[in-house]
Image: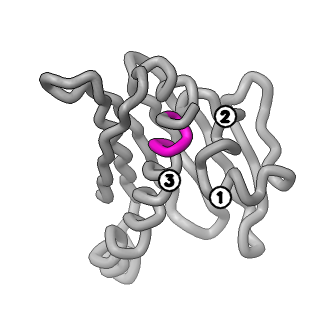
């Protein structure tokens, strides 16, 4: 499991709107921002599909409730990754803590399990970059 958090000084409803509507990701999520013309988002935005490094990628919204957004991304030939972005109030403040967690299903193959040792170091910086971009976008909106 990989987890990254950041504190955002913006109204929770404004932040949640950016997270829960995949169409809004083009304004803050680095990959969606850079490749928005290649990403096909369904309407309503419950799925998205694109090609990345020769692989088919598919995003599917799993649940969307009470300031917690849950989705999965499938990549051909790789294990699925389940994501959750949860927004919580910071005690004694108007700020909101955003927590991005990712759980990769490593399966039973030993080499997949071994790669899990490095998963946080490989994927964590990208999640933090996305959270920082969400923070910047929401605080400057």
Residue that badge 1 annotates: 31
Give the vertical position of 133 relative to 69 (above or below).
Answer: below
First in residue order: circle 3 vs circle 2: 2
Q: Residue at x 86, y 52 (%)?
A: 37
Relative image position of residue 20 (x, y in whole percent): 55, 28
Magenta stretch, residue numbers: 134-138
* Element type at mark 2: helix
Figure quadrant of residue 68: top left
Q: State the CA–CA distance, disc 3 to disc 2.
A: 13 Å
Residue behind mark 2:
24
Residue 83 highlighted magenta (yes or no): no
Does residue 136 show up magenta in the picture?
yes
Q: Position of residue 137 (x, y in %)?
A: 55, 40
Identify the secondary structure beneath mark 1.
Answer: helix
- Look at the numbered disc 3 and give the secondary structure of its residue: helix
Q: What mark, if any, has residue 106 been given in the picture?
A: none
- Mark seen at residue 130: 3
Q: Are marks 3 and 2 in contact (CB under 8 Å)?
A: no
């Amino acid at each position: 499991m990989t987890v990254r958090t950041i504190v955002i000084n913006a109204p929770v409803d404004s932040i949640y709107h950016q997270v829960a509507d995949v169409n809004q990701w083009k304004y803050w999520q680095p990959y969606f921002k850079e490749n928005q013309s290649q990403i096909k988002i369904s309407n309503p935005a419950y799925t998205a599909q694109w090609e990345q490094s020769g692989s088919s990628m598919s995003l599917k919204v799993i649940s969307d409730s009470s300031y917690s957004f849950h989705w999965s991304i499938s990549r051909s030939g790789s294990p699925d990754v389940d994501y959750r972005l949860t927004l919580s109030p910071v005690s004694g403040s108007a700020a909101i803590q955003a927590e991005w967690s990712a759980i990769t299903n490593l399966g039973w193959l030993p080499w997949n399990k071994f790669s899990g040792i490095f998963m946080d170091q490989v994927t964590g910086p990208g999640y933090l970059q996305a959270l920082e971009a969400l923070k910047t976008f929401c605080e400057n909106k």
